[in-house]
Image (cartoon, coloured by chain):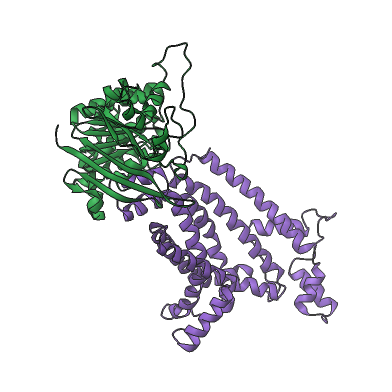
Chain colours: A purple, B green
Amino acid sequence: MIAYTVRRLAYGFATVLGVLTFLFALFFLYATPEDMARRALGEKAPPQALEQWIVNHDYHHPLLWNPDNPGQTLIVDHFRRMLTFDFGRSDADDVLVTRRLRKGVGPSLSLTVPLFVGGLFVSISLALFVATFRETYIDRAGVALCVFAMSVSILLYIIGGQFLIARVLRWFPISGFDPSPEVIGRFLVLPVFVGLAASFGEQVRFYRTVFVEETNRDYVRTARAKGCGDGRVMWHHVLRNAMIPIITRVVLAIPFLFTGSILLESFFAIPGLGSITVDAIHENDFATLRVMVFLGSLLFIVGQIATDICYTLADPRVRLE
Amino acid sequence: MSESLLEVRALHTSFPQPHGRANVVDGVSFDVNEGETVALVGESGCGKSMTALSLMRLVPKPGRIESGSIRVGARDVRALPVTEMRRVRGGDVSMIFQEPMTSLNPVQRCGRQIVEAIRLHHAESKAEARGHARDLFGEVGIPDAEERLDAYPHQLSGGMRQRVMIAMALASRPKLLIADEPTTALDVTIQAQIIDLLRGLQRELGMAILLITHDVGVVNELADRVLVMYAGRIAEEGPRRDVLASPGHPYTRGLLRSLPGVVGPEDRLEEIEGVVPPPAQWAHGCRFSNRCPLVFEPCVETQPERFRLSDGHGAWCHATKRDGGGAR
């Protein structure tokens, strides 16, 4: 188990190095420091200002090879910064990227965590419910509703929700965000609700398939034969056995709670990490964008390792060697 | 004869087929008396497992019981509300299954599964039930009961798992144990042990056993009475000795001839030509008519009636009736 974890972490580290190499190629071979400076300062900026900007942002070293000092190259700098989490300043407005992340993670989590927990609870309960009534009209109606819900674009949920609930009914504000505890809820209800509506169809369908597959297994028949009722069979036997596919999905999703929801945050003007990513793209902010891509990959790799370890907790037959 | 514990009359259970529903159990009637072992014998696909599941109202969807009556003790099983039915399952009537590998919940410890069975039917604390479970493990011959209670099913051998299943079924001292192919998935030596165990338990506890099997050897070891089933119907019934020594139905004779040991060492084993056809292709008259060596006109046209061979021994066969039971 420990040996396995160490090995997985080593593989994970190798993957991170690969991601960083790829990122470097993507950003610095595509755009030269002069391009970045010109985009940040404008086409008409004087050459001295461009020069100064490049030096300020540490982009003045050679790309891959410096004959005078092998350590002073962009690629070495890139790896050193990313691996030590020393992310430097934004290309757009010179704010420290770390400070920006710290400001954005709170609003992101306040949206994604309720959405994640609520979505999990709602879709697993609904899926257990329809799976209990499989092969009846309740099940068929449920599946039809899910397919319909997942066929509608998330944009329609967002715009429809904003129009109906915020504009016509005036229950909640259309968009905006205020982190003070008294009012934060008012701003979050609508995006969370819209997020739930947009995602439950696909989730319920997935969990239902998992549960129905489990309910056809022999041990379920045994449980019924010893006198378990439907509810007990579902919650005590099926749910626990369905944990493996559920864990894969859930644990992998957790890291992305931190990166926020790009669409919901930008439509509802929530200043989270998703908005920061979108802004970075608009403003040609390579420094911020590079960090967001790097952190996303890092969280994904961590999530995968965590998933494997969680398997052993859910299923006594799984042994990590 | 003692009061019958289980009484099944004209049971019909159907499954959807490509062209409408078909009765895979088609008018089955039989009794099981208290303390008696009745074997339900037949090839795969003849409806014996569905008969057993119908008794517990556990026919998997989309199958369903169409008609007939099932009585256990004083209870009319088909009329019971669901909550009452749950009290029967694992209470008066318990069931064990063919696959001990997959029939136990793989992610729960064995002890917990037994404790659940006990607590579903008796108001016991968890600690009491655990002690009770340990006793049950002793009763079914599981050594190191305390350790095995904490084992997961995959840590036990096939024979041990079947013992765990039996212990679970015994949790509330059932009056009837339905054993659906209890030894089929096991090694021959383990089979013998499980058969011995069942026989011993029955003697000790006085419960009735309805044994579902395709293995005539197991029938010979355990059964008091035999029901031979073919394509959803009973073909022959009678005391074990009579049915095995002087079978009255050509299908039973075919089954017995295909057994090693009944014939001499140089003889080739005989087989019944073909397999049980799917329900859509079941013959109109006698279901066995399209595989039967004795087939003649009435077999194709009309369903045979029960022909009495001796006390409690009868066969549903036109040829046997024609020959007065002498064509054997």
Residue positioned 37% across, 40% down in the render? B302
Camera-side residue: B186 or A15?
A: B186
- Give the percent coordinates (x, y) of residue B213: 36, 31
Q: In front: A170, or A211?
A: A211
Taking the spot 82% from the left edge, 70% from the top edge, the residue there is: A34
Q: Nearer the viewer, residue A7 or A119?
A: A119
Q: What residue appears at the point 20 percent right and 33 percent down from the top-left corner?
A: B207
Residue B289 spot, x, y in % from top left: 43, 34
**Dividing the image into 4 quarters, which one contains the N terminus of chain B?**
top left
How many callouts does the rendering have?
0
In the image, is B200 to the left or to the right of B25? left
**Residue B90 appears left or right of A294:** left
x and y percent of residue A133 in the render?
A: 38, 59
Q: Quadrant of residue A124?
A: bottom left
Q: Residue A297 at x, y = what percent?
A: 63, 58
Vertical order, A60 against B307 (above or below): below
Look at the image and tell me whether residue A314 can be seen: yes
Q: Residue at x 72, y 59 (%)?
A: A23
Q: Is residue B58 above or below residue B137?
A: below
Look at the image and tell me in which quarter the C terminus of chain B lies: top left
Q: Is residue B193 left or right of residue B91?
A: right
- Please determine whether, in this image, residue A241 is positioned above or below residue A97: above
Query: Is the residue A174 above or below the residue B84 in the image?
Result: below
Drawn side of residue A10 relative to residue B110, left or right = right
Q: Is residue A176 visible?
A: no
